[in-house]
Amino acid sequence: MSNSICEKIIKEDEKLKLLNDIDEINRNIYKYLVSHYEIDGLEIVIRKKDSIETIFESETNLDHEYKLIINLLKSSEAKIVFTIYTDNKKTLDVLNENEKHIHIILEIFSQSLYNKLLEKSISKLTLIDSVTGAYNRSFIDNYLQKILDLESRENKKVAFLKIGIDKFKAVIDEFDYGTGDKVLKSLADVIKQRTRSSDIIIKIDSGDFLVILLNVINCENTILIVKDLIENFGKTSVIVDEAKSSKLYKTICIGVSIFPDDSDTIDGMVKKSDIALYEARNLGRSQYFIYKDEDVNSIDLF
């Protein structure tokens, strides 16, 4: 491989390093291989000890007659597998003739790709609550505004559900923090099971969650989801004592506000759902309250 070709590859890799989107990095690698080797398709897979994840498939059909597979070890934990497809025997011959060069090229490109994947993994870890697996408050600061902007542009409504475990502090006082974590995880599991994968679950503080239902059809539909969450969590038990098979049942209250009807800002929506939760708790256990200016008591939570 000549110095001039190496310089071009390094320049191309420098461009990849400037990209923040993993899909865009993958597309640029694909375009490079198409322009230099006239390939028909590309698949990129991350293989780990316990999982296999396809991170890129070119839009063209991957069911081609010929293929060249290149495995690159990026760490003791992960391997990147590039599968290059073609229907042309001459192209396959060229690929085989240049396999060592292609391997070097993809080795360079894949390092930039792998570094970006690591950045994404680390970023995700900083946004995840370790006990429940839900997002933490950092998600609100970093990502929620972008989501709401998109929903607003498409004239979609978003429901904010502030969910509080009734008398959660009493669980800690009577049992321990371990039991409290079990209750929190149990509630997070119920929320995940009873909402869509596109909805957002955020652990706010000690016993509270904020659930964001995207593209809600209407308030009535939201109420059905709220009632379902209250009912299903009320039926969910937490094992307190394994030896005695002692079980604990808890209940939740939910406060609801609707974006952009109640507010067009994140702070406003969170505050309105807080107020609605306060009103729900005033009604007793296993209650919900839909925020309306005319129906709430005059309180200031902040």
Image (spheres, rainbow, N blue to C red):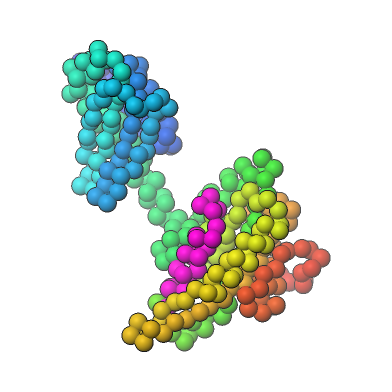
The segment highlighted magenta reads: 179-199
Q: Position of residue 193 (x, y in %)?
A: 50, 60
**Farthest residue in the right direction?**
294
Most common secondary structure along the magenta stretch: helix
| Location of the N terminus (image quadrant) | top left
Tell me which residue sits at (27%, 38%) in the image: 80
Q: Is residue 251 left or right of residue 111?
A: right
Residue 222 falls in which quadrant of the image?
Answer: bottom right
Q: Position of residue 149 (x, y in %)?
A: 63, 44
| Location of the C terminus (image quadrant) | bottom right
Residue 221 falls in which quadrant of the image?
Answer: bottom right
Question: Relative to residue 167, is residue 70 depicted above or below?
Answer: above
Q: Position of residue 235 (x, y in %)?
A: 53, 74
Tell me which residue sits at (58%, 71%) in the image: 231
Q: Is residue 285 left or right of residue 139?
A: right
Question: Relative to residue 52, is residue 272 depicted above or below?
Answer: below
Tell which of 98 and 225 is nearer to you. Answer: 225
Mark yes or no: residue 82 visible: yes
The answer to if 181 sits in the magenta stretch is yes
The answer to if 234 sits in the magenta stretch is no
Q: Position of residue 160 (x, y in %)?
A: 63, 58
Tell me which residue sits at (28%, 30%) in the image: 83
